[in-house]
């Protein structure tokens, strides 16, 4: 048997350690690059705008920023998973057909499914269908042929609103911890951009409703003002102003105070005077300071008393 010197053994160990360091560095760089790609995918989703568009695009972004090839996004409604979007590649027809089949029988999300545990604990899992047995979602294996898959919760305001499933597709590559980490990171980002888009839609709808209501109120107030003008001067109108109040306030402040006395809100005053609500708030603050009033009601009370002193209050 040939004798191996200590120097040879030491050199071999040094070489093995160098190879191990190189492998670790490559894994670290690969992981960092993958996480960066996923982050870029989430940012691109944020540019889509609409919640529906985000869900439609999400699967493609995850597939292109990772080694996962098929991505299913489902909404959780009354304890069942309702498929919303499926990415299987560039061709839409096969994906649409599979999605239609999945929608025929929504998955009941209940014990002992691993997916139920993921939705409850909000922690992503890697599932081996063969090993998990009845704990795996059989419907995904039946329709999509999943052998292994990663599943992550879509959490909005601490509530699970859906699940994201993904696998390696036809490559049949074994999934690994990096696939799990990327899916979890992507799902977190997806939930965030979806929530922000939904809030923007809600605010836009409310703004439209407020604008419609404001237009109706403005028209109604204009009619009331015309009717009031036909009956005679009213507080805040063109009648005589008490000298003490007139000396303290500017013309615009007098107009604002008069409208306050008629029960108008800041928004109503802003609409009638065609200024911003912030401008009205500024005038109200000055009115309270100049009159030494403790509140709006106190300012109106002083105004009404002053008008009564002139004999013009009604």
Image (cartoon, rainbow, N blue to C red):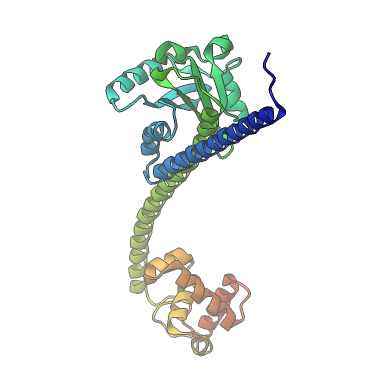
In the displayed structure, 9 sits above or below 267; it is above
Residue lying farthest right?
A: 6
Q: Which residue is painted at 40% across and 25% down in the image?
A: 69
Quadrant showing the N terminus: top right
In the displayed structure, 278 sits above or below 91; it is below
Q: Can residue 62 be seen at all in this image of the molecule?
A: yes
The picture places residue 77, in percent across and down from the top left corner, at 49, 26
The picture places residue 264, in percent across and down from the top left corner, at 47, 66
In the displayed structure, 247 sits above or below 284; it is below
Residue lying farthest front?
A: 2
The picture places residue 111, in percent across and down from the top left corner, at 60, 16
Q: Which residue is painted at 33% across and 69% down in the image?
A: 226
Q: Which residue is painted at 38% across and 72% down in the image?
A: 273
Horizontal relation, residue 175 to residue 271: left or right: right
The picture places residue 41, in percent across and down from the top left corner, at 42, 40
Q: Nearer the viewer, residue 298 or 49?
A: 49
Q: Which residue is painted at 41% across and 31% down in the image?
A: 63
């Amino acid at each position: 048997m040939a004798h191996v010197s200590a120097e040879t053994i030491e050199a071999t160990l040094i070489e093995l350690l160098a190879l191990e360091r190189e492998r670790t560095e490559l894994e670290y760089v690969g992981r960092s690059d993958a996480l960066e790609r996923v982050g870029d995918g989430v940012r691109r989703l944020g540019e889509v705008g609409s919640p529906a568009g985000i869900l439609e695009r999400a699967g493609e972004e995850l597939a292109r920023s990772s080694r996962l090839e098929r991505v299913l996004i489902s909404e959780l409604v009354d304890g069942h998973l309702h498929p919303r979007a499926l990415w299987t590649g560039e061709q839409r027809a096969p994906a649409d057909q599979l999605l239609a089949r999945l929608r025929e029988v929504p998955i009941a999300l209940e014990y002992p499914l691993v997916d139920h545990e993921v939705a409850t604990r909000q922690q992503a899992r890697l599932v081996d269908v063969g090993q998990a047995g009845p704990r795996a979602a059989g419907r995904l294996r039946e329709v999509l042929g999943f052998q292994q898959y990663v599943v992550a919760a879509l959490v909005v305001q601490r509530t699970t609103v859906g699940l994201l499933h993904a696998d390696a597709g036809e490559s049949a590559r074994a999934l690994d911890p990096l696939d799990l980490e990327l899916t979890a990171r992507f799902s977190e980002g997806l939930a965030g951009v979806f929530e922000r888009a939904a809030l923007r839609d809600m605010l836009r709808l409310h703004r439209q409703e407020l604008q419609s209501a404001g237009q109706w109120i403005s028209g109604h107030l204009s009619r009331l003002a015309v009717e009031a003008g036909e009956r005679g001067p009213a507080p805040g109108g063109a009648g005589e102003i008490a000298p003490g109040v007139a000396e303290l306030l500017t013309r615009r402040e007098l107009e604002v105070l008069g409208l306050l006395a008629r029960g108008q809100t800041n928004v109503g005053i802003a609409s009638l005077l065609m200024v911003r609500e912030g401008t009205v708030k500024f005038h109200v603050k000055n009115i309270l300071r100049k009159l030494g009033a403790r509140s709006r009601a106190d300012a109106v009370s002083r105004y009404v008393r002053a008008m009564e002193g002139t004999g013009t209050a009604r």
